Image: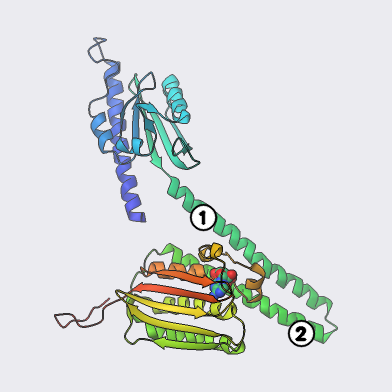
Amino acid sequence: MDATTAAVLAGFAGVVAGVLAVVAVTYSEREQHRVPADSVPPSALPAGAGDVLAVLPSSGIVVDSADAVVKNSPAAVAYGLVRGGELVHDELRHMARDVRRDGVIREAELELARGPVGRGHTVMHARVAPLGSAHVLLLLEDRTQARRVEEVRRDFVANVSHELKTPVGGLALLAEAVLDARDHPEAVERFARRMQVEATRLTALVTEIVELSRLQVADALHEPRLVDVTTAVVEALDLSRIGADAKDIELVESFEPDLKVFGDEDLLVTAVRNLVGNAIAYSEPGTRVAVGARRAGDLVEVTVADQGHGIPESEQQRIFERFYRVDPARSRATGGTGLGLSIVKHICANHGGDVTVWSEQGRGSTFTIQLPAADDRPDRHGTKATP
Ligand code: ADP
């Protein structure tokens, strides 16, 4: 759900909650001024409450003095909060009883079991209020997704701090070593070179963290332009050539002409470059890395195939997670940050595409980027597709 939809829904839920609150207050007042004791049965619901609950997008439940559910919105059943005319969760029953006892509105964030079996749970924000003298109203908003996003963000910050500590700690130690070795020029030079390596690693890490954060914020590209995929792939290859030559790895290219997508050329260069960089880093000298681009139906496919050590099947989905490495020592030795594939995944997603991997240990890996093709061919009216 995007921010606007969330805001609209939140607004709508607020309005509905407001209406229910007005109904509740009006009902309370009417109860207070009720002269003939039995003109309104104590168990009767305020007029309109049922109609409001029927259209409430979030979970709304009204219970009577015996904790029996007298009305609920459809979502309350869908979320497993109401079953057989009763509240399923003790937590909600306790809140309702407390509110009934002293008439004070209560709010709480609860983790509620999703069903009778299994360990799944939903995070619900519950607001419980008296509804007249005989009833209690429970309004529940699903906060599971918001909580998950918050957890992912906290994990990310923790991982980033951990990852930054290594090069920063290394630099501090090396600076000390340089000071101690000030009378030995060769030692100073050796330590200074290692400082350069750590500083380069730090720069790469910070650049990738910033890039990833930027990509995660934007769900889609703001101003997609028509990009020639072959041009982007050729540029990525040019940027990778020095690394390939240094390891005596041959880059083999095969491109179809006229492959166009809507997107951001710089991001596509980054994606392909990350894949080619990995193919080189995780292959032995003297092997080949084949990079191809072709049209496949409505998609443009870019493949990067290596003859490296491959990736165990059990790890093939996890490698797209941030900071996940199959062999952390090897990744560090190659200057890896553990963010490269996560960045590729986000770039593809932002372009409406995907990245997948085929790999066999000992044989190599093939990464495939698939992006929706932009038809740049003239259509029936002779006009070209424009961004
Ligand atoms: P890194 O910076 O560690 O390379 P990535 O996100 O790019 O981080 O890749 C995650 C992990 O996936 C790597 O640490 C490596 O274990 C594995 N990996 C990625 N590409 C390849 C490849 N072409 N061959 C073998 N393993 C790979």
In primary-sequence order, the first of circles 1 and 2 is: 1
Q: Quadrant of residue 232?
A: bottom left
In the foreground, 351 or 99: 351
Q: Quadrant of residue 136?
A: top left
Q: Amino acid at mark 2?
A: Glu
Q: Quadrant of residue 30?
A: top left
What residue is at 35 percent from the left and 68 percent from the top? 352
Mark 2, residue position: 189
What residue is at 57 percent from the left and 64 percent from the top? 324
Give the answer, above or below, for where 249 lies relative to 310. below
Q: Position of residue 286 (x, y in %)?
A: 60, 88
Q: Is residue 204 left or right of residue 137?
A: right
Is the distance from the Cβ of mark 2 to the nearest ligand 1 atom less than 8 Å? Answer: no
Instruction: Find numbered disc 2 in the image and state the secondary structure of the residue it sits on.
Output: helix
Q: How many marks?
A: 2
Label annotation for residue 18: none
Instruction: Find numbered disc 1 in the image and state the secondary structure of the residue it sits on.
Output: helix
Q: Position of residue 70 (x, y in %)?
A: 31, 25
Q: Amino acid at mark 1?
A: Val
Mark 1, residue position: 152
